[in-house]
Image: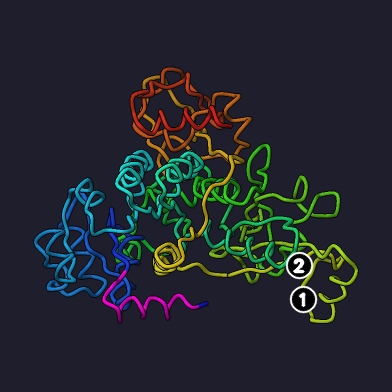
Amino acid sequence: MNLFAKLNERAENANPIRVGLIGAGKFGSMFLSQVLKLDGIHLIGIADLSPENAMSNMKYVGWSPERFSAQSLDDAAASGKTHVGDDWEKLVSHPAIDIVIECTGSPVHAINHALEAFRNGKHVLNVTVEADAFCGYALAAKAKEAGVIYSMAYGDQPALTCDLVDWARACGFDVVAAGRGHKWLPEYRKSTPDTVWDHWGISRTHAERGRLNPKMFNSFLDGSKPAIESSAIANATGLDVPADGLRFPVGGAEDLANIMRPRSEGGALDHKGMVEVASSLTREGEPVPYDIRQGVWVVFEGETEYQRNCFQEYHVKTDTSGRYASLYKRWHLIGLELPISVASVGLRGEATGVATTCKGDVVAIAKRDLSAGEILDGEGGFTVTGGLRPMKASIAAGYLPLGLAHDVKLKNPINDGTPIKFGDVEVDETTTAYKLRKWMEELV
């Protein structure tokens, strides 16, 4: 509860947390808007494939050109300004930088960036949760080997959910379920970047104003991102995942204790201790009152009569039995909240969520009938969506992780709704991402 005070101390002592950012898109821009007000954090450099776009985004969120006018990383470190360039390797190897924020959204590239940062003794905040979903446990292991911290990004729903799970457990409660909300109908599984704004809830004009990437936002709508983030939550908390994928039970924030309990007790879960996603739409497409679409939640259990009596005495909203209760945040602020991770890692040496096990995996599932020779275009695209599966079952079946379903050619035709296997694609086995995944599979 004193991160802000400690950041101010670092500023007063002229010893700010020194940060480098790879990727200045939407999430990165949201962080850029906040770091302007935090003198205890010095953004030394940004590496982006298009420095011009990065600088345009910086101006858009309030940066003056003078503030990012440093001619080099050395100049930035000495002057207190920020350097913008396109060389990520120079960024992650620069001795002045303490923490690297990986914010590209590309899982294969994110793995390269993280591992190189580890080799250079840098902590890593990984915004690219797609990479964490299919080999977060391996990245955490490599960070530990290097003596640095690897962390999820606060502001994204996985880290916020982990925070709620930790709260419940640190209070002495058993966690029954945890997860996030989502706007879901089964037909959204087939959504593409061409149709995303028809269903998302904002106009194309507003999407363009916000410089929103339709492929990235479609990865939320088609169920890929909920699967990805649920996998990350499971792997960080040890909660189980549904055997056949997320079910998206319908309910608002005040319904969670009823719907997120075992089916044997009237809920939607296979058993206690699972991840799930609450839908903000009924199956008929009607909005759910007081929805949790943009939020996160945890359901916990009052095991003893005394605890349940306390719930009642303090008017806690419980399920119908009085046994289960929930805590939730109805909103998450994405990159606007990322400074919490910077402060937690930089001041306390604590990750804001990190994989400690291999519970969940996200497999690539055909979004339509696919022909041999087609090129898969990854999450949010036109060819595949992501499905959550138990990691051990996914490895045993040879399923292709969604994070590796980018720019790979199909060798075999795949029917709509069918998981794709490694043997169905021409995968490049020389990539660092592929090798790291296979190394992790040996640990499971």
Q: Position of residue 218 (x, y in %)?
A: 43, 50
Q: Is residue 250 left or right of residue 355?
A: right
Q: Earlier in the sequence, mark 1 or mark 2?
A: 1
Q: Position of residue 405 (x, y in %)?
A: 42, 33
Give the magenta-colored segment's residue range.
2-16
Q: Main secondary structure of the magenta part?
A: helix
Q: Are marks 1 and 2 in contact (CB under 8 Å)?
A: yes
Who is closer to the viewer here, 377 or 84? 84
**Amino acid of disc 1:** Val
Q: Is residue 435 above or below residue 132?
A: above
The numbered disc on residue 271 is none
Q: Position of residue 82 (x, y in %)?
A: 18, 66
In which image quadrant can residue 17 be found? bottom left
* Residue at the extreme left: 71
7 drawn magenta? yes
Crowding at label 2, few (<14), some or many (≥20) Cα neighbours within 10 Å? Answer: many
In which image quadrant can residue 100 be found? bottom left
The numbered disc on residue 316 is 1
The residue that appears at 39% across and 44% down in the rendered structure is 146
